[in-house]
Amino acid sequence: MEVDHGWLIDWYQLRDVGIALCGPPVASLVPVISHDEYVEAVRRHMLAWPDRVDGLVTQGSQAYAILTMCRGLRTWRTGEHVSKLEAARWACEELPEYANLIRDAVVWREQSRIRPRSDGTATRDVTRRFVMDVERLVD
């Protein structure tokens, strides 16, 4: 399997908090990844998001992008990995101009579990602006 920087994020979390349900301990299977490598992988992941925005046709997919960028920014600035909800709360304080959008994204995320194909045409431009603005903060 070819592993890119996106996998590094998953492997870091797996090694950090993963628990083997059966078989050998996670640490024996996943290589050591430094915290700095992890944070840089998060930053690189965030830099790729602007290219994906045009494909986000539902509010659920837009919520995923917005909340992922919130969590990435929190990780980039503080070094901490937190839940998307915690990152959203933090980002509302850090990016007050986008607080309403971030709160909407939390709602869209919940609604997407009920109505997965909720049309995101009306919110795509503001989502694009948010993703690009946050991407510039880590570039």
Image (spheres, grey):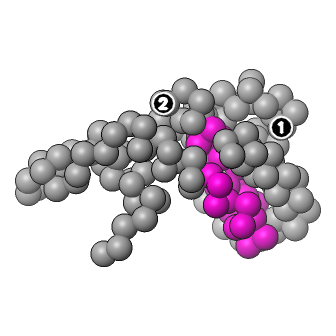
Q: Tell me where residue 3 appears, x and y as whole percent.
A: 37, 67
54 drawn magenta: yes
Q: Earlier in the sequence, mark 2 or mark 1?
A: 2
133 drawn magenta: no
- Position of 125 compared to 34: left or right? right
Give the class, few, some or many, for how many residues have Cα within 10 Å of label 2's Cα (few <14, many ≥20): some
69 or 79, which lies in front?
79
Q: Tell me where residue 5 appears, x and y as whole percent.
A: 45, 59
> Residue at horizontal 42%, vertical 51%?
9
Residue underneath mark 1: 98
Tally the marks. 2
Q: Visible in this render: residue 10?
A: yes
Position of 112 relative to 17 (above/below): below
Residue underneath mark 2: 80
Mark in the foreground, 2 or 1: 2
Q: Quadrant of residue 61?
A: bottom right
Quadrant position of the N terminus in the picture = bottom left
Inspect the image, locate mark 2, and give the three-letter code of the amino acid beneath it: Glu
> Residue at horizontal 87%, vertical 67%?
121
47 or 128, which lies in front?
47
Q: Which residues are magenta?
A: 46-73
> Residue at horizontal 43%, vertical 65%?
4
- Position of 48 compared to 38: left or right? right
Assign the magenta stretch its main secondary structure: helix
- Position of 25 compared to 84: left or right? left
Position of 120 relative to 76 (above/below): below
Q: Tell me where residue 80 appears, x and y as whole percent.
A: 48, 30
Tell me the SS state at disc 1. helix
